[in-house]
Amino acid sequence: MPKVKTHSGAKKRFRVTGSGKVKRSQANQRHLMRKKTKKAKRHGRGSLIVHPAEHARIERLLAI
């Protein structure tokens, strides 16, 4: 049986933590920042853990 390839877009967007959770960055932080409030920009920093409902789908894309 052939190897399962990792989805190229997914490997750029997600990272797996040591405990096996999947991390992602926040959306809407790339451009047009001048019209966003300071609060919106501040809350957009950092990363989040992927919701459990999406976890299996992301793992399949990452070929874990």
Image (tube, rainbow, N blue to C red):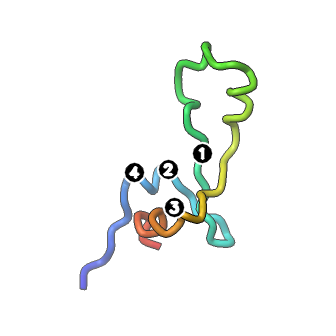
The quarter of the displayed image where residue 28 is located: top right
Question: Vertically, is 53 above or below 12?
Answer: below
Give the amino acid at mark 4. Gly
Mark toward the start of the polypeptide (4 vs 1): 4
Identify the residue position indicated by label 2 in the image: 13
Residue to which mark 3 is pinned: 54
User: Horizontal placement of 50 versus 57: left or right?
Assistant: right
Q: Earlier in the sequence, mark 3 or mark 2?
A: 2
Question: Which percent across, then down, holds residue 37?
Answer: 69, 19
Q: Nearest to the eye among marks 3 and 2: give it.
A: 3
Q: Indicate the position of residue 20 as horizontal and vertical percent values.
A: 62, 71
The residue beneath circle 4 is 9
Dot 2 and dot 1 residues touching (CB under 8 Å) = yes
Give the mark toward the camera: 3 or 1.
3
Which comes sooner in the sequence, label 2 or label 1?
A: 2
Please give the residue where the numbered disc 1 appears in the rendered image. 25
Q: Are marks 3 and 4 in contact (CB under 8 Å)?
A: no
Q: Which type of secondary structure does the marked residue at label 2 adopt?
A: helix
Q: Are marks 3 and 2 in contact (CB under 8 Å)?
A: no
Quarter of the figure with residue 27: top right
Residue at 43% over, 55% down = 10
Which of the marked residues, 3 or 1, is nearer the chain's N terminus? 1
Report helix, strand or loop for mark 4. helix
Q: Residues within 10 Å of mark 1 (few under 14, many from 20)?
A: some
